[in-house]
């Protein structure tokens, strides 16, 4: 499941008018490399921070989400538990900001959900994970894909099913969506 998740988001193509696709590709590629190799984390921050700073008030929520995701990678690679928790909390604050900027963006919601999927519930982010899960199901049911190609939507559906966090109603709904996206 882990490898399909990384492949899924690495291949995501989002046609954002204010963020060039080649920049998104570079961000995504560097982000997913950083998940497995800590040496990419600093280069990701060095790339994201000027983009966000130069955007001013019109910063793209997807950039903010990737900054938050990069902060979660810092948590993954940190050695000391207190440092891990500090980075995780910072990450969740940044991702909450991205969600509040564009609460109906499937990619942003999925990014936060996929990170929280691996975070123990005892750390207190169960409500955010539940909220993202509910919103992702709603966006999929309403075909609000944020410009994502259907193969990426199918990848999101697969991850959601594999997460084993869906109740029976959600699972039926998402499996029906899977059948629809696979039809000719």
Image (cartoon, rainbow, N blue to C red):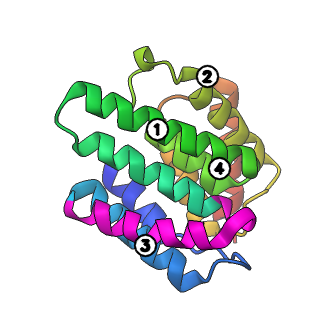
Which badge, 4 or 1, is on the more N-terminal residue? 1
Residue 127 is tagged as: 2
For the residues bearing labels 3 and 2, Cβ distance under 8 angstroms: no
The residue mark sitting in front, 4 or 1, is 1
State which quadrant residue 169 falls in. top right
CA–CA distance in space, label 4 to label 1: 13 Å
Task: Sort mark 1 into few (<14), some (14-19) or many (20+) by Cα contacts within 10 Å.
Answer: some
Which badge, 4 or 3, is on the more N-terminal residue? 3
Relative placement, left or right, of 88 versus 13 is left
The residue mark sitting in front, 4 or 3, is 3
CA–CA distance in space, label 1 to label 2: 17 Å
Which residue does the numbered mark 1 point to in the structure image?
Answer: 90
CA–CA distance in space, label 3 to label 2: 31 Å
Residue 3: x percent and y percent?
32, 56
CA–CA distance in space, label 2 to label 4: 16 Å
Relative placement, left or right, of 115 versus 168 is left
State which quadrant residue 88 falls in. top left
- Range shown magenta: 39-61
Which residue does the numbered mark 4 point to in the structure image?
Answer: 98
Which residue does the numbered mark 3 point to in the structure image?
Answer: 47
CA–CA distance in space, label 4 to label 3: 18 Å
Locate the C terminus and report the quarter of the image it occupies: bottom right
């Amino acid at each position: 499941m882990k490898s399909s998740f990384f492949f899924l988001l690495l291949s995501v193509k989002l046609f954002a008018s204010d963020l060039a696709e080649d920049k998104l590709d570079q961000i995504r590629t560097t982000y997913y490399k950083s998940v497995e190799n800590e040496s990419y984390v600093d280069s990701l921050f060095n790339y994201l921070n000027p983009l966000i700073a130069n955007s001013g008030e019109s910063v793209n929520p997807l950039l903010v989400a990737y900054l938050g995701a990069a902060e979660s990678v810092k948590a993954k690679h940190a050695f000391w538990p207190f440092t891990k928790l500090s980075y995780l909390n910072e990450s969740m604050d940044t991702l909450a900001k991205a969600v509040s900027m564009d609460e109906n963006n499937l990619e942003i919601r999925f990014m936060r959900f996929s990170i929280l999927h691996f975070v123990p519930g005892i750390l207190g982010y169960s409500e955010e994970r539940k909220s993202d899960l509910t919103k992702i199901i709603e966006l999929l049911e309403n075909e609000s894909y944020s410009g994502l190609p259907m193969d990426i939507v199918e990848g999101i559906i697969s991850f959601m099913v594999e997460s084993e966090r869906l109740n029976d109603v959600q699972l039926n709904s998402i499996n029906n969506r899977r059948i629809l996206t696979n039809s000719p």
